[in-house]
Image (cartoon, rainbow, N blue to C red):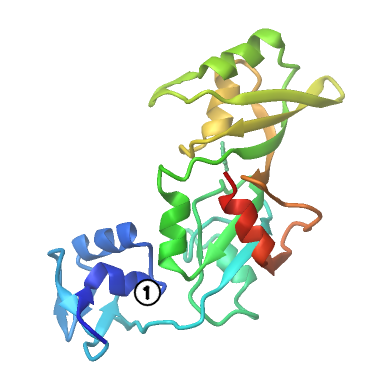
Amino acid sequence: MEEIRLQKYLAMCGVASRRNAEQLIQEGRVSVNGQVITQQGVKVTSKDKVKVDGKPVQVEKKKYYIMMNKPTGYICAVTDDRERPCVVDILKEDVEARIFPVGRLDYDTSGLLLLTNDGDFMQKLTHPSYEVWKTYRAVVKGVPNEKNVEEFAAGIMLEDGKTEPAVLDVVGYKGKNAIAEISIKEGRNRQVRRMMQEIGHPVLSLERISIGALELGNLKPGAWRYLKEKDFEALFRE
Ligand code: URA
């Protein structure tokens, strides 16, 4: 194996995306042959002994691409310091590789979540240039009106700046409340909840139903399956 940059090597090992690997290095969590590395750009080969948080890592040859219906009450992480259940726990019995969630859904959000051990795939899907609509179905308090729909289309001012244009569509009713489908291209922290709060119709429950043309379909909460060829096409369709 030729020499490659440490962050690329960590991505190939399925430890993190390249971007997140840079952060791990910066935080002093990576060592090469027993020496902690904090500067970027160090090169390694497969002969070097690379450890993350003291644990050896190896290039994982088999790549896993998984879609899950994340249940509420799970966090999108590999471990949690508050010992809440993590989405990867659901896979542990069946998948031996170190798998990571691609992006985040909130603890109290359910729905379509991708997981992988392929750092490059992760990087592609979380990069700002991957601009696909992500659609959520929410039960929201009250019933949004036409003005709210227009506000969404123009972008909503949040404390971290105005959002890109978004789509709000009332598709049904639950008592006095509405069932809405909300589509956004960005992925800011708690974005849908904050946008709905801002227009006065806070979210009561939230589920992601599609990423690009890839739909959750009839996967039940907690169920998962491997991606098929047509799912990759759906993710990367223009
Ligand atoms: N927007 C939110 O508010 N929460 C999520 O989990 C995803 C998008």
Foreground pick, 205 / 125? 125
For label 1, count other residues whose C-alpha is less than 10 Å away and answer few (under 14), some (14-19) or many (20+).
Answer: many
Left or right of residue 188, residue 207 in this image: right
Q: Residue at x 17, y 86 (%)?
A: 33
Foreground pick, 234 / 39? 234
Residue 232 x, y percent position in the rendering: 61, 60
Identify the residue under disc 1. 12
Q: Quadrant of the N terminus?
A: bottom left
The amino acid pointed to by label 1 is Met
Report the label total: 1
Residue 38 x, y percent position in the rendering: 14, 66
Residue 203 x, y percent position in the rendering: 66, 30
Q: Residue at x 55, y 18 (%)?
A: 198
Residue 82 x, y percent position in the rendering: 48, 58
Q: Is residue 157 visible?
A: yes
Query: Is 219 placed above or below 167 here?
Result: below
Left or right of residue 123, residue 235 in this image: right
Could you say which quadrant of the image residue 88 lies in? Answer: bottom right
Query: Is 112 placed above or below 158 here?
Result: below
Q: Is residue 86 visible?
A: no
Q: Residue at x 24, y 87 (%)?
A: 49
Residue lying at the far bottom in this picture: please name it: 47
**SS of the residue at dot 1?**
helix
Residue lying at the far front in this picture: please name it: 238
Q: Is mark 1 within 8 Å of ligand 1?
A: no
